[in-house]
DNA sequence: CTCTGTGAAAACATTCACAGCG
DNA sequence: CGCTGTGAATGTTTTCACAGAG
């Protein structure tokens, strides 16, 4: 059992994934799960899972595994997902629109409580029940609604300015979708969702790979699966 | 100078960021850049930058730094960003729509060459010059257009099925926006853009932090910055 | 006999510190 | 001098292997 501040970064990254799988099992009515299965589910190993979960005390039962319900509850509590989070979204563009209605955020308790954009033409427009507010309302609204987190979904050149305003409003967590690094004072945490960096890594990774034997060239695949969009 | 396959993962993650900064400097007409500046720009250290870049040979000049133009060219070449990449996007939902027009992809040479969705009501709709195609056209189109990469932007339950079809079509790189792990055969690379995992990490990180002295309560901030959306 | 919890070992990544080139 | 390239030192994460609880 380690202290909150000393949890290794990689463990923090995996916790939401453990929780996700635990909740899936919970819905299926599964009672217990082994470290091996949990590992397989998130693309890791049994030993890794045990080490990770051991950070938070004796969550498992020897000879049995982890009790799904308890594990899920414990992880939700550790991640503070047993209470709702209020989020301010800055940027009413294409990505902002997608995030406004992003189902997985809602399901996990992250509610977009307010939406901001500097474009006066968007001011006052309503989007899925949410009014676009001008940037000068940010601080007031953040305080009035008790908002905890900020999301940046503006063009890269505007990202730093928005970050400064989110920090000035008192937010201590920022999820940045803009393809730009931002500077924040110590005590404010930033996570990046930088699609360009991800896809560029992919380009590098597959370039090095063996020329890749394309699969046999039967005409029309027999795969037939789903591909709908939310 | 190390071999392509042996580049450490963290270095791969940072390369696109070095390139981004190098190109910004290039546009500003800056001639050379030091490891210290490059480090500061991406939130890293001078030593780290030098170690990273040394993976690819003697890119720098002692006493001078890195020649911006050469560095940018070299990084573009290493990341294979000196030629266009064709991308198949699966999922004509909100996130799919945002990605279709995502400027940074285009600027970096990633072109959405085809768009797929399993929903027959969307079939044939045109979106920013791109027709929505049914899933059964995937393999044929991937081959006809020489598509290199796939993007998954469908609900989590559909992600594995889509991944299977992308693999069957011969793609060896997948960027997955669905909040779900996917299994692919060896030789296929996957990167995840999982917003839920990111925001949950953020929730954990700020929960542990000191109660956080809210900044002084002057009425209305004097920050005044931009917050428009693309 | 099963499956966790955990030290000890190995692999991996970052930082340091300085030699050496321009 | 200034700033890179790099071996050696340090720190971190993963893997191993097994003791021990149920």
Image (cartoon, coloured by chain):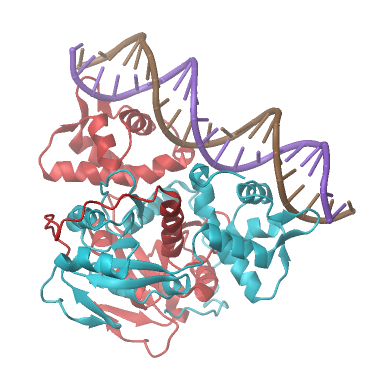
Chain colours: A cyan, B red, C brown, D purple
Please determine whether, in this image, residue B206 is positioned above or below residue B50. Answer: below
Q: Is residue A107 left or right of residue C17?
A: right
Residue B92 visible in rendering: yes
Q: Is residue A34 left or right of residue B140?
A: right
Closer-to-camera residue (B28/A193): A193
Q: Residue at x 36, y 77 (%)?
A: A101
Residue closest to the far bottom: B121
Closer-to-camera residue (A21/B162): A21
Residue A128, position as x, y percentages in the image = 30, 82
The N terminus of chain A appears in which quarter of the rendering? top right
Q: Residue at x 42, y 79 (%)?
A: A229
Q: Is residue A13 left or right of residue A140?
A: right
Closer-to-camera residue (B166/A162): A162
Q: Is residue B125 left or right of residue B8?
A: left
Q: Residue at x 19, y 36 (%)?
A: B68
Closer-to-camera residue (A212/B179): B179
Residue A208, position as x, y percentages in the image = 45, 46
């Amino acid at each position: 059992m380690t202290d909150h501040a000393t949890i290794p970064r990689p463990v923090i990254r995996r916790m939401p994934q453990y929780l996700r799988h635990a909740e899936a099992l919970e819905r299926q009515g599964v009672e217990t799960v082994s470290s091996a299965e949990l590992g397989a589910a998130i693309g890791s190993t049994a030993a890794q899972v045990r080490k990770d979960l051991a950070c938070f005390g004796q969550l498992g039962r020897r000879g049995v595994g982890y009790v799904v319900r308890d594990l899920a509850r414990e992880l939700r509590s550790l991640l503070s997902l047993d209470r709702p989070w209020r989020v301010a979204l800055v940027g009413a563009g294409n990505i902002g629109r997608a995030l406004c209605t992003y189902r997985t955020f809602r399901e996990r308790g992250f509610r977009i409580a307010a939406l901001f954009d500097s474009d006066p033409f968007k001011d006052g427009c309503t989007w899925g029940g949410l009014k676009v507010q001008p940037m000068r309302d940010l601080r007031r609204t953040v305080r009035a609604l008790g908002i905890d987190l900020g999301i940046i979904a503006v063009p890269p050149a505007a990202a730093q300015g928005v970050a400064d305003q989110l920090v000035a409003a008192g937010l201590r967590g920022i999820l940045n979708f803009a393809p730009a690094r931002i500077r924040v004072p110590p005590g404010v945490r930033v996570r990046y969702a930088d699609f360009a960096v991800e896809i560029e890594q992919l380009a590098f990774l597959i370039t090095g790979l063996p020329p890749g034997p394309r699969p046999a060239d039967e005409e029309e695949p027999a795969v037939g699966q789903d591909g709908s969009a939310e």
